[in-house]
Image (tube, helix red, strand yellow):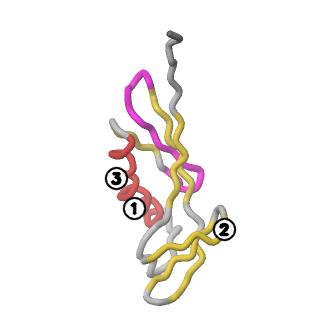
């Protein structure tokens, strides 16, 4: 599948030579300082609440969890081969003044 950006919030995906308009599922990732993990949630993906030690690990976990949850909730059209998602991450830190 090839993706081409066509609008700020949409993409064109070529699947089997047919172009489809896709809007990514939106995910929010926040750093939990107390637990020392990245935590992800989403209004677009019912039931999404997962975490990982690193941001890269979180992305890999989301690649598995998001499609599973969408299938379980009956939100994916028949024949969907992949799911496009976008992660908005936030982490706050203090920078000491020299």
Dividing the picture into quadrants, the one containing residue 68 is bottom left
- Determine whether the residue tagged by mark 1 lies in a helix, strand or loop: helix
Can you say whether 53 is above or below 21 in the image? above
Q: Earlier in the sequence, mark 2 or mark 3?
A: 2
Question: Which residue shows up at 57% across the image and 54% down it?
Answer: 26
Report the residue marked by disc 3: 60
User: Magenta stretch containing residue 68, yes or no?
Assistant: no
Tell me whether circle 2 and circle 3 mark residues in contact (CB < 8 Å): no
Question: Which residue shows up at 63% across the image and 72% down it?
Answer: 6
Can you say whether 39 is above or below 72 in the image? above
Question: Residue 64 vs residue 21: left or right?
Answer: left
- Determine whether the residue tagged by mark 2 lies in a helix, strand or loop: strand
Tell me whether circle 2 and circle 1 mark residues in contact (CB < 8 Å): no
Number of marks in picture: 3
- Kindly report the distance in space between the C-alpha atoms of the residues bearing marks 2 and 3: 26 Å
Question: Which residue shows up at 58% across the image and 56% down it?
Answer: 44
- Kindly report the distance in space between the C-alpha atoms of the residues bearing marks 3 and 1: 13 Å
Which numbered disc covers residue 7? 2
Q: Earlier in the sequence, mark 3 or mark 1?
A: 3
Q: Residues within 10 Å of mark 3 (few under 14, many from 20)?
A: few
Q: Which residues are magenta?
A: 33-47
Residue 51 position in % (x across, y down): 39, 40
- Determine whether the residue tagged by mark 3 lies in a helix, strand or loop: helix
Instruction: For marks 2 and 1, give the one nearer the viewer.
Output: 2
Q: Main secondary structure of the magenta part?
A: loop
Report the residue marked by disc 1: 68
- Kindly report the distance in space between the C-alpha atoms of the residues bearing marks 2 and 1: 27 Å
């Amino acid at each position: 599948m090839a993706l081409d950006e066509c609008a700020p919030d949409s993409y064109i995906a070529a699947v089997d030579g047919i172009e489809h308009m896709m809007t990514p599922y939106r995910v929010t990732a926040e750093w939990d300082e107390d637990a020392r993990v990245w935590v992800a949630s989403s209004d677009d993906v019912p039931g999404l609440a997962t975490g990982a030690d690193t941001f890269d690990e979180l992305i890999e976990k989301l690649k598995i969890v998001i499609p599973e949850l969408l299938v379980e909730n009956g939100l994916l059209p028949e024949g969907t081969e992949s799911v496009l998602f976008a992660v908005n991450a936030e982490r706050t830190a203090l920078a000491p003044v020299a």
